[in-house]
Image (tube, grey):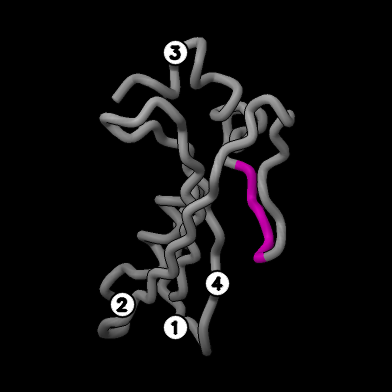
């Protein structure tokens, strides 16, 4: 669980965080890692559906490290947010970069 804060995981964390906030990436962007730290990327698309006002947009904002909207407004259409999260799965000696495409 503390791998990201260890010396081995710190470069991966630094690639997704800027000034103590999570960096925002577009749909075609990804974190820049030195060639020596290149890792496979595993992509997941997560579609959030539900009733209006239940907190789907607030959840995406919280996961992305951005402030939630202060007032409720209905999301028109679909908002796509791309999050990257480095992890080192148990039993694996190599880190993986998860790319989560959240569709709200």
Front tag of 3 and 1 = 3
Q: Which residues are magenta?
A: 23-27
Pick out the residue farthest to the bottom. 77
- For disc 1, the marked residue is 74
- For disc 3, the marked residue is 6
Q: Is there a contact, CB below 8 Å, between mark 2 and mark 3?
A: no
Magenta stretch, main secondary structure, is loop
What residue is drawn where x is 67% and y is 43%? 31
Tell which circle, 1 or 2, labels the residue nearer the N-terminal end: 2
The crowding category of the residue bearing disc 1, from other C-alpha atoms within 10 Å (few below 14, some 14 to 19, many at least 20), is: few
Whole-angstrom CA distance, mark 4 to mark 1, is 15 Å
Figure check: 92 above or below 41: above
What residue is drawn where x is 44% and y is 13%? 6
Task: Name the mark on residue 53.
Answer: 2
What residue is drawn where x is 66% and y is 54%? 25
The crowding category of the residue bearing disc 2, from other C-alpha atoms within 10 Å (few below 14, some 14 to 19, many at least 20), is: few
Question: Callout 4: helix, strand or loop?
Answer: strand
What residue is drawn where x is 35% and y is 70%? 56
Whole-angstrom CA distance, mark 3 to mark 1, is 41 Å
Q: Quadrant of the C terminus?
A: bottom left
- For disc 4, the marked residue is 80
Q: Quadrant of the N terminus?
A: top left
Tell which circle, 2 or 4, labels the residue nearer the N-terminal end: 2
């Amino acid at each position: 669980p503390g791998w990201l804060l260890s010396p081995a995981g710190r470069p991966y964390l630094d690639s997704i965080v800027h000034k103590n906030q999570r960096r925002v990436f577009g749909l075609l962007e990804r974190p820049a890692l030195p060639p020596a730290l290149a890792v496979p990327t595993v992509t997941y698309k997560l579609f959030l559906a539900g009733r209006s006002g239940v907190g789907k947009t607030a959840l995406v904002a919280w996961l992305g490290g951005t402030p939630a909207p202060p007032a409720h407004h209905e999301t028109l259409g679909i908002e796509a947010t791309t999050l990257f999260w480095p992890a080192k799965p148990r039993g694996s000696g190599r880190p993986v970069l998860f790319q989560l495409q959240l569709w709200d």
